[in-house]
Amino acid sequence: GAGVSQSPSNKVTEKGKDVELRCDPISGHTALYWYRQSLGQGLEFLIYFQGNSAPDKSGLPSDRFSAERTGGSVSTLTIQRTQQEDSAVYLCASSLVRSRGSNIQYFGAGTRLSVL
Amino acid sequence: SQQGEEDPQALSIQEGENATMNCSYKTSINNLQWYRQNSGRGLVHLILIRSNEREKHSGRLRVTLDTSKKSSSLLITASRAADTASYFCATDAGGTSYGKLTFGQGTILTVHP
């Protein structure tokens, strides 16, 4: 596709429900990143994929959060048993990572999650 | 914790004036990037400066990097109302973590027509 696509753009859920957020990166981009941004805050790193593997998942806040990437393309971020503090904008980015080169990330428009 | 810290947190100027935002970071870097965000949604890459560069220009943007002070600045000249947005610096530590960016808290820029 022309850019990074995220769906849904908005998600309202009830506390305790599970949610799945989807990211479709730019075709050919090997690296994929998930971030979380709370209101008025900077970006909090969640997880990084290189291909289908996740060499860095250090930012996942709890074991309720998980992510997978299949076929080196689409990624899904799953939040189980959502809590109100999970409310935020979840941003996905992809990049074409070159060894010892620059890494410019291309972002999707994000999914705004509201947990009631 | 966030690697980059922007200063100021908010900046309000008149159209035509210059806007300067600063970023400080803690660890050594491979490169530093600036991104722009409108309306709290996706970020757009503006400019990248490598650790061996001291200054870079792109249109009305000028970025400086001082690795000895672990700081960078973004200058937007002749600002326009359309420049109103949040601006973030992001650092790439390179090495085994290359590719991963650590973002600061951002500077909210408001340009009044």
Image (spheres, grey):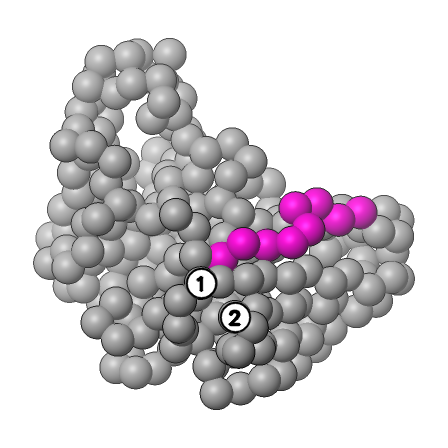
Q: Is residue A112 left or right of residue B12?
A: left
Q: Amino acid at mark 1?
A: Lys
The image quarter containing residue A52 is bottom left
Rendered location of residue B63, percent (x, y): 63, 74
Q: Amino acid at mark 2?
A: Lys
Q: In the rendered structure, which disc, 1 or 2, sits on the residue that comes first in sequence?
A: 1
B59 is higher (above) or lower (below) than B76: below
Q: Chain of mark 2?
A: B
- The residue pinned by badge 2 equals B70
Rendered location of residue B9, percent (x, y): 65, 46
Magenta residues, start to end: B4-12
Do the residues under discs 1 and 2 have CB atoms within 8 angstroms? yes
Residue A99 is labelled as none
Q: Chain of mark 1?
A: B
Find numbered disc 2 in the image and state the secondary structure of the residue it sits on. loop
Rendered location of residue B110, percent (x, y): 76, 47
Q: Is residue B42 left or right of residue A95?
A: right
Find numbered disc 1 in the image and state the secondary structure of the residue it sits on. loop
How many angstroms separate mark 1 from mark 2 (CA)? Answer: 7 Å
- The residue pinned by badge 1 equals B26
